[in-house]
Image (tube, rainbow, N blue to C red):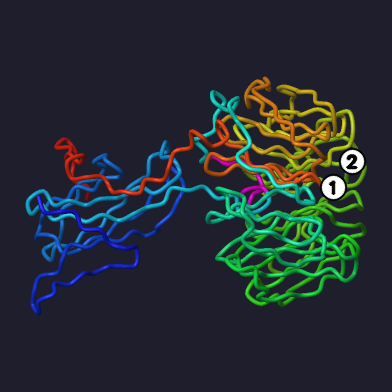
Amino acid sequence: MRGLKMVSLASLFAWGAAQGAAAAPAAKLSAGTGHPGVTVTVTGSGFGDSEAVDVYVGTADTLLLVTTATGTFSGSVTVPATAQPGVDYITAIGRHSGDAVQVPFTVTTLWPQYGFGATHSNWNPFENTLSASNVNTLGTLWQFSVESTGATPAIYNGVVFNSTAAGIQARSISTGKLLWSNLNPFVVYATPTVAGGVVYVGTVDGTNSTLYALNASTGATIWETSLGGGMYGSATLVNGILYVGTYDDDNVHAFRASNGALLWTYTTKGAIGTTPVVVNGVVYVGSFDDKLYALNAASGALIWSYATGSYVESSPAVVNGVVYFGSDDAYMYAVQADGPSPGSLLWKTKTGDSIFSGPTVAYGKVYFGSADDNVYALDAHSGSTIWIYGTGGDVKTPAVANDVVYVTSDDHLLYALEASSGGLLTTAVTGGAFYGAPSVSNGVLYVNGYESGLYAFALNAGTTARPAMKRPPSEASLHPDFSLPVSR
């Protein structure tokens, strides 16, 4: 077998040094990074005519392809759901020629915005390092006593983006080292929204508040646009449009993400401190006028509204056609988002006090905190109570990953609870109160305490973290699976 050839992701064809020489084997992936369980397409060239080619993910023979008459192939492989964070390799080896080529693939899970993804479910379904069986070994990987504002940390391409009372900070996920900061001396309560190498975040400065787009690598300002009121909620980015709510002027705005141009504004009758969620062309957002609004994402026109008994300070989540949100009237609501009767109540469940917490929806349950100091888990279909866990303070929005509910309380503790039963798995002392939810990415839990600092927790304080694979697997470790059928 010929020696394995390493190629960069950008490389598609490698030609022989001598003119007229046959093309050397080459390959590329449809994506160079992705979460566990993702499917990527691998294409190759320079192999033998009509040759069988084994495609390995790591050391496992995963796919058998047959090349064309010109020695090319294309097929899809799935990264194992158990794949751990770090660099792995996808290898293609011709069974007859022995030609071989390897392409690196980085396994990673981002938490790039409030609520994890576009639906704001606050659930990372790809986390597979932290679990209910080992979370009791969590220890502090690093901590910095910055004057944070408690917003959920955003995780993107090896960087944690943190909101503070003096602007926005970018820190290394491995060491917490400060990489850059910007927007000082403005207060930032919003979770940064990170996409395409750009950080979108708004300030809180009354009618002088501003929405910014910053370079994620350097922190340099790309554009800025004035807001009529401060942003306590975060920006939601969908199809190149940023949707934000503002507090002092009661408005919902849509801006073009490329340049900050205002597209439309809808005015409610109360302050907006929540983060909009955008699903299927509809913007859902709560207001201090006691209502949840559903607006047309393209025009801002009102589709429907639902009235509660008090302020809606809970950022909504939309999952499976249902919008979940809490109210200061102490109820958690489930309202039909679409279908034959959008805006109609499906159920509401009362707690002992106001619900500022945004709901977290996972495993058919709705998890949230209440000012009655309890964490709740309700059946997402019926609203019936599954379990309640009591803390010593006002409970914030939970984050869920790999069957664990992570939640902070104003009793200065971080709790890890078993998702199905609510049983306590472990706690950690963090100090200070909280505003947003934790975030979970690549086996690390991040918590941003209100005026108490930014924390990163890892298994055994990071001493047992799996190092990224630096070397490709050797030829000797790659064995063809002769029982694999040819993929057509």
* 363 to 455, vertically: above or below: above
How many labels, in total? 2
Q: Residue 197: percent from the left, percent from the top?
A: 56, 66
**Among numbered discs 1 and 2, the one appearing first in the sequence:** 1
Residue 328: mark: 2
* 394 to 281, vertically: above or below: above
* 317 to 193, vertically: above or below: above
Q: Residue 456: percent from the left, percent from the top?
A: 63, 42
Which amino acid lies under the numbered mark 1 shown in the image of this protein? Answer: Glu
Magenta span of residues = 115-125
Q: Main secondary structure of the magenta part?
A: loop
**Label pair 1/2, CB-CB below 8 angstroms:** yes
Horizontal arrangement in the rendering, residue 79 relative to residue 102 (left or right):
right
Comparing 462 with 385, the one in front is 462
Residue 313: mark: 1
Q: Where on the picture, by quarter, is residue 324?
A: top right
Residue at left offset 65%, top offset 20%: 421
